[in-house]
Image (tube, rainbow, N blue to C red):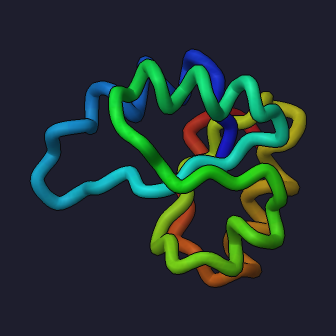
Amino acid sequence: MGCGKHSLNTHAIPCKNLPNLELTSIFDSSIDSLAKFEKAYGRELEKFTRQDYFFDSDIEAVLIGTPDEFHLKNLVDSIDAGKHTLAEKPL
């Protein structure tokens, strides 16, 4: 969740070649952010701009990479949707 530079450069790119981890989907309310993230990541990903569709998908885990003020709500929504969730910054 959240397709800014931090999510891309600190999480997506460094984890790109881990054998047991596959980035399949990205969520951001900004279509431009989704496109920039996907281009920099170097492959096509399933893209979501609506949170309800994102949580209804088959994704197994969520990384909260949204701005800090949204972390708590995003974390609660993700857990309520039954997703494994990582929030590495302040709630």
Q: Is residue 34 left or right of residue 74?
A: left
Vertical comparison of 17 with 77: above or below: above
Q: Residue shown at 43%/19% (left/top)?
A: 40
Give me the residue at 83% from left, 58% from top.
50
Q: How many marks?
A: 0
Q: Looking at the picture, does residue 31 appear above or below residue 44?
A: above
Residue 58 spot, x, y in % from top left:
52, 79
Query: Is 60 situated left or right of 28 in this image?
Result: left
| Residue 24 drawn at (x, y percent) | 42, 56
Residue 30 place in picture, x, y as percent: 81, 33
Q: Is residue 52 left or right of residue 65?
A: right
Classify 87 as above or below 6: below
| Left or right of 30, for residue 54 | left
Quarter of the image for residue 65 reads top right
Q: Position of residue 91 (x, y in %)?
A: 77, 42
Task: Report the residue at 82% width, 71% height from top.
Answer: 52
In the image, residue 17 sits, relative to residue 23, either above or below, namely above
Q: Residue placed at 87% from the left, 56% from the top?
A: 73
